Amino acid sequence: MAVPRSLPQRIFLLAHNPDQGKVGVGTNLGVMLRAAALADLYQGGHLTDERGRAAIDVRHPCHDPVLDALLEEIAGSKPHTWQSWIGHRQRPTVHAVRRQLNDGGWVHLHPHKILGLFPTTKVTIRDPRVREELLGRVDTALHEPIGGIDPADAALVAIIAAGDLTLVLDRKTRRANKQRIQELTELSGPIGPALRKAIQAAAVGEA
């Protein structure tokens, strides 16, 4: 089975812990998915950076409900920083990406209730090879010549690193590849630094 085309779906699959059968508690999933959607729009030419703010460059359909919804948000609002957009509507974005993966056949959703009271949904990846393929792309981006790296894979690594997704890039690996991660972050545009700021700001707000 081919990997999903959209960065949010790829990030979701990488954030899913196969051993636990779920995305781990404390994972910055919502902000990473928002950042991934912004990265897709930026790399697709839908958005441009205007003095640190996300601005619509060319308005045309993305043919992806998550990306189209985010583009609609941006079009209907005054200009905001990338960091601000990353912090918006995280829960609906998680649910929308999860539905996309289910509809595309990459995952199976199992609604159930914890203790018979609290509704939740278990997510099972249908074909583990899809996630393995994505892990391989991360490894390639870290080790192959920078000029041959797909910009989408550069953004994938930048978001994983900024989002502190240690399930994919543990601290030892990040330290060993610090320079390459910085190069991939610069290659992928303003999203990685904005994601890092959004997580830092949320942490300060919770303190």
Image: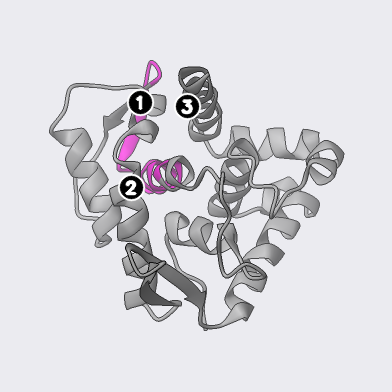
Q: Quadrant of residue 196?
A: top right
Which residue, as the protein is rendered here, is positioned at the far left?
76
> Mark 1 highlights which residue?
84
* Residue 64 falls within the magenta-colored stretch: no
The relative height of residue 10 versus residue 101 in the rendered view (above or below) is above
Image coords of residue 155 (percent x, y): 55, 46
Q: Secondary structure at mark 3?
A: helix
> Mark 2 highlights which residue?
91
**Mark 2 residue crowding within 10 angstroms, few (<14) / some (14–19) / many (20+):** few
* Residue 43 falls within the magenta-colored stretch: yes
Image coords of residue 129 (percent x, y): 63, 79
Real-space Cα distance between discs 3 and 2?
Answer: 15 Å
Magenta span of residues: 34-52
Image coords of residue 66 (percent x, y): 29, 55
Nearer the observer, 29 or 38 = 29
Q: Amino acid at mark 1?
A: Ser
